Amino acid sequence: GAQHAAAFAAISDVEVAAVVGRGPERAQHVAARCGAKASDDLRAILHDPEIDAVSVTCPTEYHAEVVSAALEAGKHVFSETPLTATAAEAESLRDVARRVERHLQVALLMRFARPAVDLHDVLESGSLGTPYAITTTRLAPGTTGTHHRDVLEEILLFDLDVLCWSLGQPESVSATAVRGPEGRLDHVVAALAWDRCRAWCEASYLAPPARGYSTSVRALCDDGALEGEFRVPIEGPPTVEVRRFRADAAPDVSPDLGVEPVAAECRHFADVVRGRADPDLLDVDQALVSLRVLDRARESMTRR
């Protein structure tokens, strides 16, 4: 929530009108940083006629309730990922958005982040030929509390979105997982298959805090390969390295972080509301594609 508030406050023609929190202290802290009022009364804020749009960053279990209430109040909505835990819940919210004729956009963050953007470009353009094998890894320090739910919907979903954005719905999906002491899925590996391409996606909460957060990708194609890693260490700035390999050329290595993805996705939403950007990129229908794959992955685990 603090990240979204800061990103919107930095946009010249956007005003952060209010910050709503479950407790007054945190809401006041974030609101003070962006010149907004703080409140713990969501309904009152939603019915403020001066507010055009709402960014939903509360815990996942409350997304459906808050998103639906905001849409019914006539607001455009930008929801953090995951929109909901299942495709069926998301479809219900999509139907509300279409009925009230408001934008429902989802923070599909990886569509702005390296090296995921590079992977999408390679797969869509065919610049390295036909993709055969893709591996993604997303390792996060263990989380506690109620804000984040299992690793499948909170972490793996980002890579599922990039693959579906690039290759469409896979023909087959299966997954296996390690459960934590309380039964939550804390480490998941999913296998996806398209006509000629296979992908293995790993996501985990089991990484020790001292390791920090990291994502990596490797795509092996018939005319070359792409490798990339993004890392957020405990100390120091984030780093990224993307490497492209071709049989007839030296490796192309880039350490460019690219755009700051949270700022980019928030600006895109603001531009959609203003009618200045393509709403399809982050539309709820885009989020539904990967949520359907997530449903299939979860179902595959129940059959074991």
Image (cartoon, rainbow, N blue to C red):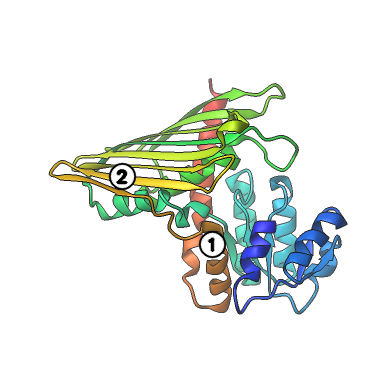
Q: Extreme front residue here?
A: 236
Q: Residue at x 66, y 29 (%)?
A: 184
Label 1: how many Cα within 10 Å (few below 14, some 14–19, many 20+): many
The answer to whether residue 161 is above or below residue 173 is: below
- Going from N to C along the chain, the mark reached first, 1 or 2, is 2
Looking at the image, which is closer to me, 80 or 267? 267
Looking at the image, which is closer to me, 157 or 256? 256
Residue 181: % across, % down: 70, 21
User: Disc 1 and disc 2: Cα gap in Å?
Assistant: 25 Å
Foreground disc of the pair 1, 2: 2
| Residue 233 sits in quarter | top right
| Residue 98 sits in quarter | bottom right
Circle 1 residue: 265
| Residue 291 sits in quarter | top right
Whether residue 24 is visible here, answered yes or no, is yes
Looking at the image, which is closer to me, 116 or 260? 260
Q: Residue at x 57, y 56 (%)?
A: 107
Q: Are marks 1 and 2 in contact (CB under 8 Å)?
A: no
- Residue 216 lies left or right of residue 182; in this view the side is left
The answer to whether residue 158 is above or below residue 209 is: below
Q: Residue at x 47, y 40 (%)?
A: 215
Q: Which mark is residue 49?
A: none
Circle 2 residue: 243
Whether residue 294 is visible here, answered yes or no, is no
- Residue 21 lies left or right of residue 211; in this view the side is right
The answer to whether residue 211 is above or below residue 244 is: above
- Residue 48 lies left or right of residue 179; in this view the side is right
- Residue 108 lies left or right of residue 64; in this view the side is left
> What amino acid is found at the position of numbered circle 2 in the picture?
Arg
Residue 248: % across, % down: 12, 44
Q: Residue at x 73, y 65 (%)?
A: 70
